[in-house]
Amino acid sequence: MDALHRPGAATGEETLDPTDWAVLGALSHRIVDDAIGFLRDVRERPVWRDMPAEVRTFFDTALPRSPAPLGEVYRQVTENVMSYPMGNIHPRFWSWYMGSSNFTGALADFLAAIQGSNLGGGNHAAALLDAQVVNWLKEMVGFPASASGTLVSGGSMANLIGLTVARNVKAGVDVREHGVAAIDKPLRFYASDQVHSCHRKALEELGLGNRALRRIPSDAGFRMDVAALAAAIAQDRAAGFLPACIIANAGTVNTGAIDDLSAIGDLAAEEDIWFHVDGCIGALIAIAPENALRVDGIGRADSLALDPHKWLHAPFEVGCALIRDPSAHHAAFAVTSEYLEATSRGLAAAAWLHEYGLQTTRGFRALKVWMALKEHGAEKFGRLIDQNIAQARYLTTLIEAEPLLELAAPTTINIVCFRYRAKGVEAEALKAINTEIMLRLQEEGTAAISDTTVHGEHCLRVAITNHRTHRDDLFLLVEETVRLGNEIAGS
């Protein structure tokens, strides 16, 4: 130690911390005030607007090599980013299937970023809170307390986690050690023809291929035909395949249809097949007092995917995979590394959360869910789900009462599929009219809706997952759809 000396403070070393914390504090207060105004005044802005050429050019600027004042950086963000949002927090955003966020969740994301914890594991408060949120989600959907789970980026990853465990359990060989080539009989996974595309991607990534996913026809209500499912399983067994997993929908992405979860659960048990539920659309209906029966049987699943950034309105992104058998879950992902050995005391004296998924580095996603649930309570979120479903029924009645509109599919929960109809117009021309209606609604800033095709028929699609939506907004949608349809059809 004699040859060493402690360096003084002025060594010329750099940091990213500010030179003036008071200036930073003042700007931070302004940013928070602006953020509050951004949400408070959301109804006064268009749902969406296209970016002019000069704004698009801003995103082509070169890499900054020298510093700029943070106030100037924030000005650029305000003018070029905050002014042109996707729009999904707006009460008339009903495209695709988006949550609408909440201010408490945004504050939580800020605090999570400030704390900066890595949720790969370790003995610290954020890891315990992460586990607590998973436990709350298990309770919401009726999973046993003994089940395991992990927070992930969203539904696609949550489904991949569940299907990975299903493959490994049903393969009959140690897939992690020997790979899918060692599987004796080709595996078969089953889902309805309404299944989300992420399942195809998952089976491709799992090395099984798209052909391993057998699509089962859906009925007039867009639910999986259970009799056809049973027949397909029998056919595959006779042909030398190994039926491994049934993927049931608790809300399809096209129409919101909910498969008969109890009947499919019974069939999976009889056939000794893994029962996975894609609940990213509707699993959380389980907490909605007026509609919970729609997802009866969901708690019987071997694995379940759900999305707190939808009907719990957490800011993007947070999904969750729940697995009934914790040992199977852990066995599918755990790897012992010499640099991540557990200790009896200290920072490593806790479970490694990364051993339940693909990410070693994991963000602190749980805090935004935790804080919002603490603030509002699960019962309020359940009532908001019921509210959205009631709003979808209201929109359905408006469409049924309007001679120039027609439903394209039954309204099950909160997704309404419909189209403008014009007499004597063929299918392709009618599709063009409806597509133009959708685009003009977006471009005029009135509403954001999407389109899809169900059983070969093109239609417009309204997914109401927004806690800010009012019935007046839906009435306006119908008025504007008819106005635009008449204008386009008559031009």
Image (cartoon, rainbow, N blue to C red):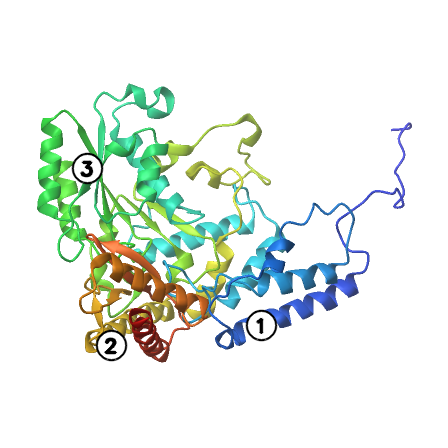
Q: CA separation, marks 3 and 1?
A: 50 Å
Drawn side of residue 354 relative to residue 398, left or right: right
Mark 2 crowdedness (10 Å alpha carbons): few <14, some 14-19, many ≥20: some
Residue 461 in sight from this viewpoint: no
Where is the N terminus found, in terms of image quarters?
Answer: top right
Q: Secondary structure at mark 3?
A: loop
Q: Is 12 displayed left or right of 346 in the figure? A: right
Q: Which residue bears the numbered disc 2?
A: 398
Tell me the residue that label 1 is attached to: 36
Camera-side mark, 1 or 2: 2
For the question of whether residue 122 can be seen, the reply is yes
Checking the image for residue 348, the label placed there is none
Task: Name the quadrant of the C terminus.
Answer: bottom left
Give amino acid for label 2: Leu
Which residue is painted at 29% across and 67% down in the image?
288
Q: Which badge, 1 or 2, is on the more N-terminal residue?
A: 1
Is residue 348 shown above or below 396? above
Q: Is residue 435 left or right of residue 401?
A: right
Which of disc 1 and disc 3 is earlier in sequence?
Answer: 1
Quarter of the image where one finds residue 308: bottom left
The image position of residue 289, as x and y in percent, is 27, 69
Residue at horizontal 51 percent and vertical 77 percent from the top: 44
